Image (tube, rainbow, N blue to C red):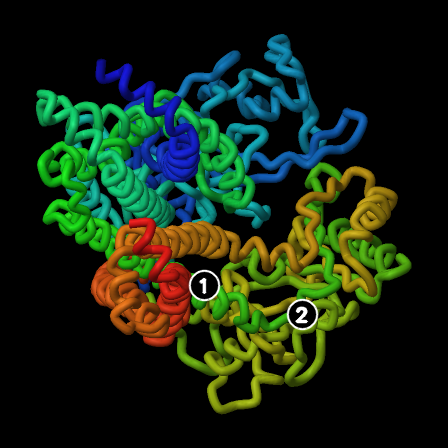
Amino acid sequence: MVLRNSLRLWVKESTFVVVTVVILAFGIGAVTSVFSVVESVVLRPLPFDEPSRLVIVWETESDDLEANVSGANLLDWQSQSQIFEGLAAFAPTILTRTGIERTERLPGVEVTANFFPVLGVDTHLGRAFSEHSDDAKAVVLAHDYWERSFASDPSVVGESIVLNGSPYVVIGVAARDFEFSFEEADVWTRAPDRIPRPPVDFGVAPEELRGLHWLRVIGRLREDVELASAQAEMDLIASRLAQAHPDDNAGRGVNLVPLHEQIVGDVRRPLAILLAAVGSVLLVICANLAGLFLSRAVRRERDVAIRSALGASRNRILAEHLAESLSLGLAGGALGVGISFALTRLIVFFGPADIFRLDRASANLEVLGFALALSIGTGVVFGILPALFGSRSNPSASLRNSTRSSAGISRARLRSALVVAEIALALVLLVDAGLLVRSFHLLRNVPPGFDAEHVLTLRLWLPDTVYDDDASITAAYREILESLSRLPGVEDASAVLGVPLSGTSANFGVVIEGRPAPEPGEELEAGLQPVAPGYFRAMGIPLLLGRDVALSDDKDHRRVAVVSATAAARFFPGEDPVGHRFSNDGEEWIEVVGVVGDVLHVGLDRAPRAEVYVPFQQVVFPFMTVVLKTRGEPALLKTVAEREIQAVASDVPVYRVLPMDDVVSRSIATPRFHTLLLGSFAATALLLAAVGIYGLLGYNVSQRKREIGIRMTLGANDRDILGLFVSEGARLVAMGLGIGLLGAVVVTRAIESLLFGLSASDPTTYLLVSTLLVVVTLVSTYLPARRAAALQPLSVLRQD
């Protein structure tokens, strides 16, 4: 019977049903889409065996910053620690695949033989690495790369592919769900010795390089070992190593971070904030629907009273009301799941590429279960209060048509309370969004120290099988740059190790000539950037003193460098740095020949570092970023530049080809993503709050027509009637504003870590948001009030 009455609602009030279902669907769809991202990124277990026992092992510097691990320290950890089942190391590498139609650059990861066993993962095909010597020339393919380049051919296992000029045997294909967020990888290779090789051959066995930190290390704790006790043991080992090797290890410690925390720690809070925000929007929707159901309950009050007089129990009426709201909630949820598919794709499309498993967000069983629970919950939330009021109506009063009964007054108060709650929630969301918008604006306008317009960047990595010494590497880069500089539309062609905002740099310890060596742990450090002539001009970096590097600055001439303004102030305070000398090892001295402006290498939200720019022919790296200053749109030169490089060096793959504007844009992708989503939710909440107050006052006008007619008959003019309803709306706005401001003060603390350049209590944001909310809601108040003032008293009283 209850179900039949619910179905009758769908037939008799189809417009009401459609509006309710559609509004609910968008709310449930939005929440479900954000939850699907949270489930994929944060809640879904990592695809490893017992992932809770996996930890990332970092070295820490004197300022407690986490750093990569040196090969010598890793070997000491392995021999001295008793807490790990295994310690595995990995390091990124770039491989060039030849022997195919088009030379291909492959991002790879070189790992120790125990890497896959430590993680506890199986391969999709074949096997993982072993200690067997033959595996030094073996490769495991990433599942995506296997599908893309080998058409998912299972017979690939046992085949040979040419990487960096050497044949490698494919021994396995990684599992489909195997993702390791630290490094992009199409292939995995095994270290030929006990640890992966450093990115540059220093002519020293990797295990002897205690001062060079290039490895990342993952460990699996023994079953009976807690994280705290493991940390205590590693602290003790670090202390012993600092005493045994003070030159390299003084001030360095060890930090163990659970793998799951390492991967999702930076995104957990922002995603939780976004989920809470979209949940607040759904609450505003529920408040609006509850008000709609209350209005509908008034229209049905006489019917309910008749049924009560004929013997229908209160529980029966309550059950029918709840059944109606639940059926609408489930219908909205079913449509919302479909909407969530599209919204999830939009979130993935606009989301930063570096959020772990964001692209894997999908409507799995957990997400569908969440949507079902949400549908039932929303049906109860927006239906329970109207159901209680509808079942509690007084049959006698209702049959006498007492529209201003105590029940009617209670319903009016409840509707007012719901609107106040909507305004308060909208204000909290608007303040959060306003803070993020202002923060993003400040971040976006930070001077980066360079000019990104009309600059194209191209990454190159010269394979060591062809370019096996410094002379061949520098000759290749000189020929490439000379060829590119002759292209039409190119003003300057240069190169650098890592462009600004890329984070790519080498660390460089600085010893100043004529000064005592610093105490252990107090060493001077700078970022090291090999550059080709014309780099500063191409990037629009101002030359403040001295000169640029030149082609004559090669290995046959004295060592020189250009330093950044921060490096000059830090290393030579109060002095003209040009002509001073410094060194990395206290033996080979480098003369400062110029000073350039600071640039931001790590991020717009980071202070500029001390940077040392050295001629690319004196400090040689096989991998560099070519920088082209163009006269027109840089993207138009992409194909031409790639073809020119291939014509000069056909065995050198070109990758990561980006206009510098895109590099800047990608560096702020995460805060832009947070701002866009939270801003969208806040704007939706504002619109819903405006609709809520408009609907409430419109309902009040329709219910109080007789009162308005009497007031106007007794002498009230349209201005009095307008003021009556505007003041009523203003009172609700003021109450919502007050509650919302108190809530915002508390809630904004959660987003403080996401802000740049302003505090969570920024008064300007609060003032602007409050003003916006007042204007929008007062407009929503004025429109129904204007309608009330336009009523004709005689026609109203005649209708009544």
Near mark 1 (Cα within 10 A), the count class, few <14, some 14-19 or many ≥20, is: many
Tell me where residue 767 appears, x and y as whole percent. 35, 74
Near mark 2 (Cα within 10 A), the count class, few <14, some 14-19 or many ≥20, is: some
Which of the pair 373/254 is nearer the observer?
A: 373
Q: CA distance from mark 1 to mark 2?
A: 24 Å
- From the viewer's perspective, is 677 left or right of 399? right
The reply to whether discs 1 and 2 touch (Cβ–Cβ < 8 Å) is: no
Q: Which residue is mark 2?
A: 451
Q: Which residue is mark 1?
A: 437
Q: Secondary structure at mark 1?
A: helix
> Residue 95, located in which quarter of the rendered image?
top right
In the rendered structure, which amino acid carries the disc numbered 2? Asp
Which of the pair 153/23 is nearer the observer?
A: 23
Q: Quadrant of the N terminus?
A: top left
Query: What's the residue at 64%, 34% (across, down)?
Result: 106
In the rendered structure, which amino acid carries the disc numbered 1? Val
- From the viewer's perspective, is 667 left or right of 156? left
**Badge nearest the viewer, 1 or 2:** 1
Tell me where residue 30 appears, x and y as whole percent. 41, 39
Looking at the image, tell me whether mark 1 or mark 2 is earlier in sequence order. 1
Tell me where residue 700 appears, x and y as whole percent. 28, 54
